[in-house]
Image (cartoon, coloured by chain):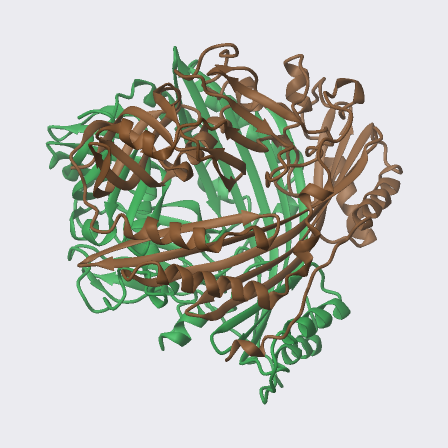
Chain colours: A brown, B green
């Protein structure tokens, strides 16, 4: 089939006040039940996904989904239920299930809705204009298909050793969220996001290597295809011919994509929930120096370009900027309302809901390490000899965020006298979370964000004396 | 769930503008989830989802859309929008629908609907008490109990339809133990494609005790060695090594895209001759079992490797058509929101004939890997990792100290050839496998095996 057969069909839908109406309608029904407080969370997404293979559309999919999650508070116990079917009877079943679930859970003195007196910010610090780009709506499906096809061609053209592009795709979405609670909160916001990615297979001699890269933004025009193609190609070919090295301790230079993933591990240990449940290595460490150097780390829900920016969090608390580490010292944990009350402090606006399927847990928004002025080349020359890590594999199976142990696969290039020497693969690096923080010696100026569970940003990092296991 | 008349109308609407194939996938699911942590029932939630996925093919392209509803007008409208994405005419039309048969038939004795909320709560509270009473070093226990009751209906333009009722249950216990500055964890899960009768087979208390035993044992862990060593991999969850080192590379979508190291290797020796490996979605009540796959084809047993020789790949419908092979009933999807593609079901290295103890005795210095935190692979290169969550040093043929969590890294094709021993103690363990952002339920399995040498990602030379 020729792709010209795919007709122009813009397919965007913005719900606007529909979500608030759904919440109000559910609220009227809840009022017939004997409950103390309630909260209704409605969320919808309209998504479009394109996968290209060898210049043709492999998959084109559309989705349009909506769901409602209801939290019921009764005698300081919380029950939850959700439904994706919004007919009157399904909403009523959902409420009944939530009410019934509130009879099973444990009663806790801090289980009640956020009240205005305990919030840090009273006014929203970021609004729809930053989160929802109207220009996003101008892109037709054809233009997005063309963009993905262009990325495939561009990547392949970067290096003769690239033999296949095993995946190239584009994904975008409009998310809308509304929260209404019985304490008087009622608001909504909407966001646009798009993501494009490519993975390149390269071959030389008998060796095969893969490398991928991506870009994400609020609208397609912000995606830099040249840069994405170049990085993907480079990440693939630069490790061609890589070999295992001898096991040894060495300094490591971490690409931002790698350091951001490791910073994400640190972020996960900073939720007040994990601390209060004694599952965090940062328990009792507020005010202590965690990094050897003057590192500053923030969780900022108000970054204009942050894909995890939001005016309010998953329970309607206004989100601002939180300083997590200042000059290397731990300043605070991440809080939602419940955990903040337990620690006699205020919520940092970090109640996060993965979707309408789940209750608000504690999680990050845009979590990043402040970059320095130091350029990558300076870091490279300071390494002397060491291992430049381009990619890690097995972060989920190799890091235990509770015990703190970290051991994961790595590939990259061996550095000798401040310059790249020999590709390396099939080795592991091992440390633990607190040692990792202590081992950071220099921070780069090349801050880059990756979408994970939240939006995590880090510059290149120079870390010292880490065990590499190989031959 | 839907009338034949409407099914045909939708399939034909999808075909209308020149499609080669059309399909509808209807799914209704009810979930219950209960979580206990800090000795409190923290979360009790229920969910209900209903929807329909619509798929069509034109040439090599797949078009997909879904709706969160079974209303006729919404389904027809979605079908029209999807088929309007292409320009053409079709001579294909579905006139009759025939029900697909499957030999997989199980009885569900205690479906979620028959279980009182208090019984769920009692299960978690008992697990919590048992785990805490095991040892005073236990400082935290998190246990989760979820169940799903699901109905699916799948029909396609070949004129086939299938329907299935699925019940799944999942219980997991996470234990944290602490001594001084050292914090260690233990994890065990029970997951079955069955009702609550799963607990008659495995007592939740035993699961909790096992998780505590791991966490407490690991408090004595020493730093793992670094470098290449012989590794004995324990039964059940040890099968994650095959899943990563080989299984993903045998999924036909990777083969089709030239992104598998096992392309063009059918009939060739890819593993040591003591290795026979199978994917079997017909194993009764197992976590990765089903009556029909996500495309309505019956489950089946597929021999992947026989005596070291590669026999077959893991196919869905699309890849089997493209590669002119027989589909193997492995087209799976996370839900009606997702496009199916080839996935493993219950995948295992079959039993060999060695005594597991003698395998350990044969190692003078190495690692015994008993429990795992999962793994990851790059199918194009075969490079894989898996994380050991309970491992031990082997010294002079005997298991000695526990070692801290560590990752093992290797290359699939190389490691398969270095399997030197296969035990006679085949067992299975459940898990979730993520690929292209879709999670599906799997079991991995194997008897005790020994790999000649593999890189252990420890901290000591």
Is residue A203 at all visible to an observer of this figure? yes
Q: Nearer the viewer, residue B6 or A440?
A: A440
Q: Is residue B155 above or below residue B396?
A: below
Establish if B365 lies above or below B236. above
Q: Is residue A318 above or below residue B319?
A: above
Q: Position of residue B402 (x, y in %)?
A: 26, 24
Which residue is more in the foreground, B160 or A205?
Answer: A205
Which x, y percent locates residue A372? 45, 26
Q: Residue at x 67, y 36 (%)?
A: A310
- Which quadrant of the structure image shows residue A251? top left
- Residue A217: x percent and y percent? 57, 47
Query: Measuring 50% from the left and 62% from the top, which residue is drawn there?
Result: A148
Looking at the image, can residue B389 be seen? Answer: no
Q: Residue at x 44, y 31 (%)?
A: A445
Q: Residue at x 53, y 45 (%)?
A: B169
Side of B188 relative to B76 (left or right): left
Q: Is residue B406 left or right of residue A155?
A: left
Q: Is residue B303 left or right of residue B328?
A: left
């Amino acid at each position: 089939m020729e792709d010209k057969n795919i007709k122009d069909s813009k397919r965007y839908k913005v719900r606007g006040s529909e979500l608030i109406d759904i919440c109000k309608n559910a609220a009227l029904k809840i009022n017939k039940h004997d409950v103390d407080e309630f909260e209704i969370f409605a969320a919808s997404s309209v998504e479009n996904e394109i996968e290209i293979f060898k210049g043709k559309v492999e998959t084109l999919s559309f989705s349009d989904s909506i769901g409602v999650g209801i939290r019921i508070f009764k005698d300081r116990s919380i029950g939850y239920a959700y439904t994706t079917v919004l007919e009157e009877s399904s909403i009523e079943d959902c409420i009944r299930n939530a009410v019934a679930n509130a009879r099973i859970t444990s009663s806790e003195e801090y289980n009640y809705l956020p009240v205005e007196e305990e919030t840090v910010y009273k006014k929203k610090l970021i609004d729809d204009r930053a989160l929802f780009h109207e220009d996003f709506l101008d892109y037709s499906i054809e233009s997005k298909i063309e963009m993905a096809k262009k990325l495939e061609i561009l990547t392949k053209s970067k290096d003769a050793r690239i033999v296949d592009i095993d995946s190239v795709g584009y994904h975008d979405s409009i998310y809308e969220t509304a929260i209404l609670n019985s304490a008087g909160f009622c608001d909504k916001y909407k966001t646009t996001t798009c993501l494009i990615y490519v993975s390149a297979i390269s071959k030389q001699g008998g060796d095969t290597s893969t490398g991928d890269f991506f870009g994400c933004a609020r609208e397609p025009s912000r995606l830099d295809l040249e840069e994405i193609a170049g990085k993907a190609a480079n990440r693939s070919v630069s490790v061609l011919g890589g070999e295992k090295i001898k096991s040894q301790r060495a300094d490591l230079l971490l690409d931002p994509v790698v350091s951001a993933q490791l910073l994400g591990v640190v972020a996960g240990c900073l939720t007040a929930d994990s601390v209060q449940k004694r599952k965090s290595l940062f328990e009792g460490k507020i005010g202590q120096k965690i990094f050897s150097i003057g590192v500053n780390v923030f969780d900022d829900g108000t970054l204009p370009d942050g894909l995890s920016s939001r005016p309010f969090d998953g329970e309607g608390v206004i989100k601002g900027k939180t300083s997590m580490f200042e000059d290397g010292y731990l300043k605070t944990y991440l809080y939602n309302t419940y955990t903040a009350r337990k620690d006699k402090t205020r919520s940092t606006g970090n109640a996060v809901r993965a979707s309408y399927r789940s209750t608000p847990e504690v999680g990050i928004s845009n979590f990043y390490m402040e970059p320095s002025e130091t350029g990558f080349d300076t870091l490279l020359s300071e390494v002397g000899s060491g291992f430049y890590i381009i990619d890690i594999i097995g972060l989920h199976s190799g890091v235990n965020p509770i015990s703190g142990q970290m051991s994961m696969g790595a590939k990259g290039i061996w550095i000798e006298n401040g310059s790249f020497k020999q590709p390396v693969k099939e080795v592991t690096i091992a440390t633990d979370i607190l040692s990792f923080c202590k081992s950071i010696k220099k921070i780069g100026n090349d801050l880059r964000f990756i979408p994970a569970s939240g939006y995590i940003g880090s510059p290149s990092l120079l870390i010292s004396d880490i065990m590499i296991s190989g031959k | 769930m839907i009338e034949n008349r409407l099914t045909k109308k939708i399939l034909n609407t999808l075909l209308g503008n020149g499609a080669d194939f059309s399909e509808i996938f209807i799914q209704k699911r009810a979930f219950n989830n209960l979580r206990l942590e800090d000795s409190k029932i923290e979360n009790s939630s229920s969910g209900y989802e209903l929807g329909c996925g619509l798929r069509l093919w034109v040439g090599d392209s797949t078009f997909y859309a879904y709706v969160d509803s079974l209303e006729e007008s919404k389904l027809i409208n979605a079908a029209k929008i999807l088929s309007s994405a292409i320009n053409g005419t079709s001579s294909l039309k579905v006139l009759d629908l025939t029900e697909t048969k499957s030999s997989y038939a199980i009885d569900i004795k205690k479906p979620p609907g028959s279980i009182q909320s208090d019984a769920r709560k009692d299960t978690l509270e008992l697990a919590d008490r048992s785990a805490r009473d095991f040892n005073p070093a236990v400082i935290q226990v998190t246990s989760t109990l979820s169940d799903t009751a699901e109905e699916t209906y799948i029909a396609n333009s070949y004129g086939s339809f299938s329907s299935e009722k699925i019940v799944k249950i999942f219980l997991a216990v996470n234990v944290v133990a602490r001594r001084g500055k050292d914090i260690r964890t233990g994890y065990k899960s029970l997951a079955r494609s069955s009702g609550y009768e799963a607990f008659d087979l495995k007592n939740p208390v035993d699961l909790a005790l096992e998780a505590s035993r791991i966490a407490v044992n690991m408090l004595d862990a020493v730093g793992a060695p670094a470098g290449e060593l012989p590794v004995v991999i324990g039964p059940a969850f040890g099968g994650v090594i095959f899943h990563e080192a080989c299984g993903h590379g045998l999924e036909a979508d990777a083969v089709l895209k030239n992104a598998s190291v096992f392309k063009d290797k059918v009939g060739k020796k890819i593993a040591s001759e003591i290795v026979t490996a199978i994917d079997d979605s017909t194993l009764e009540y197992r976590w990765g079992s089903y009556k029909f796959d996500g495309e309505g084809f019956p489950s089946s047993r597929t021999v992947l490797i026989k005596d070291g020789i590669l026999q077959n790949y893991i196919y869905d419908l699309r890849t089997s058509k493209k590669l002119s092979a027989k589909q193997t009933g492995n087209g799976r999807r996370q839900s009606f929101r997702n496009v199916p593609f080839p996935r493993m079901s219950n995948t295992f290295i079959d039993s060999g004939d060695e005594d597991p103890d003698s395998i350990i005795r044969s190692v003078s210095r190495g690692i015994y890997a008993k429990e795992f935190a999962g793994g990851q692979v790059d199918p194009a290169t075969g490079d894989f990792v898996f994380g050991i969550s309970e491992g031990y040093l082997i010294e002079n043929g005997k298991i000695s100290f526990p070692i801290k969590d560590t990752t093992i890294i290797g290359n699939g094709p190389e490691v398969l050839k270095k399997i030197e021993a296969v035990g006679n103690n085949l067992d299975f363990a459940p898990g979730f496998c993520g690929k292209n952002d879709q999670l599906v339920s799997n079991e991995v399995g194997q008897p005790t095996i020994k790999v000649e040498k593999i890189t252990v990602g420890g901290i000591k030379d």
